[in-house]
Amino acid sequence: MTSLSPAAHRTGRTAIRARAAIQVDLGPQGLPRVSDLRSEVPIVLRLTATQRATATDQAAATVHLVGAAAGPLAGDDLRLDIAVGGGVRLLVRSVAAMVALPGWGPGPSRFAVSAEVADGGALEFAPEPTVVAAGADHASTIDVRLGATARLLLREEILLGRFGEAPGSFHGTLRVDVSGAGPAATPAPLLRQDLVLGPDVPGMRGPAHLGAARAVGSLLVAGPEQAGPAVDAGVADGAALLPLAGPGYLVSAIADDAVSLRRRLLAGPADPVWRRA
Amino acid sequence: MTELSPDRPGLGAAAESAARRATLLVLADGRMPTGGHAHSGGVEAAVVEGSLADVSDLERFLLGRLHTAGVVAAAFAAATCLALAGDTGADPGIAELDAELDARTPSPAARAASRAQGRTLLRTGRAAWPVPPGPRAPHHPIALGMVCAGAGLAPADAALTAAHLTVTGPSTAATRLLGLDPIAVTAVTARLAGDVAGVARAGERAAGLPPRDLPAHTGIRLEHLAERHRLASPRMFTS
């Protein structure tokens, strides 16, 4: 990293505050229109692919998150706002794992993602894992609001410590709401999860929480296709396939390492790995 | 017990406090037929898979359950009791709290177990106290908050009972499943009393938050165990 962008002002001795944004709508001729792609160091966004709508697929845009600095470090306050319009699909990826590190800033490092997906739109948010280094204190918030006919795939992977390292502290908040049909309908909660991890978390290493696992993650699939009893619950080694009360299912997994975690999360509902009652 | 009668002037506050504690003991008594004895809270599945084999495993299981599911249960029991305390005629929002708990319980087996226990608790609670109207089979913490409100208890009592039950149900189940020494298990639950009180206080403090901001702490393996339990055969417990 050579310089901070003008808008990335310092909030403390070393802490960085940054706001980045993506907005994608359906443009003319079946092409996605990226009307906003605002990077702010250290969150640098790159539009890496666009795809015209076809007879079977929506118009789609792929944006990669490129980390332009190490971290986040303690005190860093990063935010990414995503808006997806109707009739278009946005895929958000990242080029590498994000490593939350200790630092000298006040409070934890923070990364907040907020997304709004309009009716008929789709968001695939599947960045590489977040690694919580020893001594780090990282807070992650993901807040998604879906229109009644919007679709979502959301993958979150947490690795406790770099290889062979003790875990840092992590507090993840995941909130997904789905609007009811009709203009006056209030949004219904689909998923609420606070994942609190760290060396001082009581019982984390016990059989009710993580056991000995170093990697933990989830993959949420939501959308109108998931309304009703679309998916049967199942279990596999270190994983469970959980149909939610609302229109979606969650694959929840723990593993010893990132590769096994990813494999467990990618088992779809039709995968023979699931054992069912 | 005439000296404890709230009708006697001068003894009002003390008598009320004693009456509340006596009611709380009835509610938190494991012998109250609330159906809780049929549920192990994930213990049976953990025993079957081998991750819970002795008293020290049980202690770590209980700590993890208390600081995840227990935090959520305490907050929702307290929030329900608080919502019903006003009796303002406005919709107390029980359905919204129930939907928020659904969103905090991704495992369908865990949702079913919670609602089954909520239904049974309400049935017994309604026979004992004037429990306010509400859903027939709400999640267990909602039912607990409703019963507490009906029994004249405070949100703090609801939170404490919820946190207490988070630990005692699985303890009893582990004792039966593993043939653990009940005296050693009692020592474990006694050691956890401070944690139970802390979780209850956190739940009570959260009770006034908007429902979407109530705690949502998740114990990852608890959700897996709830589903794994359905595959186990034979089963001693329903969940």
Image (spheres, coloured by chain):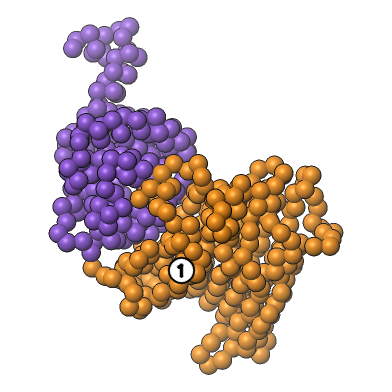
Chain colours: A orange, B purple
Nearest the eye: A213 or A60: A213
Query: Residue A229 placed where, x, y %?
Result: 31, 71
Look at the image and tell me in which quarter the N terminus of chain A lies. bottom right
Task: Tell me the residue at 38%/65% (across/down).
Answer: A239
User: Where residue A33 sits: x, y (%)?
Assistant: 69, 80
Secondary structure beneath label 1: helix
Relative to residue A219, is residue B187 depicted above or below? above
Front-most of residues A255 and B66: A255
Looking at the rendered image, the quarter that the C terminus of chain A falls into is bottom left
Q: What amino acid does circle 1 point to? A: Ser
Residue at the spot of label 1: A260
- Which picture quadrant has residue A243? bottom left
- CA neighbours of label 1 inside 10 A, class few (<14), some (14 to 19), many (20+): some
Instruction: Report whether residue A185 is seen.
Output: no
- Tell me: B183 left or right of A68: left
Q: Is residue A154 above or below residue B83?
A: below
* For residue B22, above or below residue B218: above
Residue drawn 74% across the image and 53% down it: A17
